[in-house]
Image (cartoon, rainbow, N blue to C red):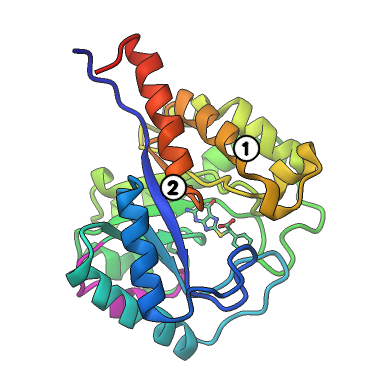
Amino acid sequence: MTTVVVPEVMGILNVTPDSFSDGGRFRHIDQALRQAEQMVADGARYVDIGGESTRPGAAAVSLQEELDRVVPLVEKLSTRVDVLISVDTCKTSVMQEVLPFNVRMINDIKALQDEGAVALLAQYSTDICLMHMQGEPRTMQHQPHYSEVVEDVSDFLAERMAICTSAGIARERIYLDPGFGFGKSVTHNYQLLQRLEQLHRLEQPLLIGMSRKSMLGQVTGRPVEERLAASIAAATIAAMKGARILRVHDVKQTVDAMNVVAATLAGDWT
Ligand code: 7PM
């Protein structure tokens, strides 16, 4: 039997009422727990919990509101569901409240740039995802500009990683993410996907999120609720280019695709 590595699947569990594709259906904890259980049954290794909408143009969520949405869910999930918990936040005070629970990853679209975030994470052993974003969520899609997008994203991630390791965060804890859709034109996104391998030069595992994003809507002409096939294509491409974790809405279908990738890479089925 040949063993091959295909990406782990991270299911997106959004607890924001204005989440762009789930319409706030998971506002209630019980529903969120059931959703997490289903994701595990479908083959997710992680669930990613985010209480702040990062939709381009979205209003910022207050700290108290984010805490109210996220902390009780993390607490219950950590004792009741056998899954690795990722918390999607860029606020140091939210990290501080969830880290004492059994959290495996802090997924930060601002790459630990909030004050005190790096120092806080240095005191824990949680994994960290450092994501690239140009600008701020509210305005990031207005005229994104790069001298060379893959180089620029790579340089940013290398710099954030250096700041983390200098503060005492072990390299083994760090995942990198080019941040598809975050301050990028459609062309920038496809240049990043075309040359994803280039990010392996940083020698860290890659976490990739393209599920239902507008880069898929643009090339298919589909609205967000009709982007499953495009999302599976994008996930498969990222897998073939060596991504370690795929952050997705549609866990079951993505896991099926990853089983096809695994059989292909192995040239075998077991
Ligand atoms: C509205 C627009 C709501 C965009 C949500 C989003 C990523 C992430 C998000 C990603 C990592 C989405 C995004 N995307 N974290 N959080 N990487 N690490 O489509 O690509 O889910 S939020």
Q: Residue furthest top?
A: 267
Question: What's the magenta region?
Answer: 88-103
Instruction: Using the image, determine if residue 120 lies above or below residue 190.
Output: below
Q: Give the labeled residue for mark 1.
A: 229
Instruction: Using the image, determine if residue 146 lies above or below residue 142.
Output: above
Does dot 1 land on a helix, a strand or a loop? helix
Residue 188 rendering spot, x and y as whole percentages: 71, 38
Q: Residues within 10 Å of mark 2 (few under 14, many from 20)?
A: many
First-in-chain label (1 vs 2): 1
Residue 68 rendering spot, x and y as whole percentages: 41, 87
Where ligand 1 lies, by quadrant? bottom right
Quarter of the figure with the C terminus: top left
The total number of labels drawn is: 2
* Residue type marked 1: Ala
What residue is rendered at 27% in x and 44% in y? 171
* Residue type marked 2: Val
Instruction: Report the disc number at residue 251.
Output: 2
Does dot 2 land on a helix, a strand or a loop? helix
Residue 257 rendering spot, x and y as whole percentages: 46, 31
What residue is rendered at 37% in x and 54% in y? 39
Instruction: Using the image, determine if residue 266 lies above or below residue 89.
Output: above
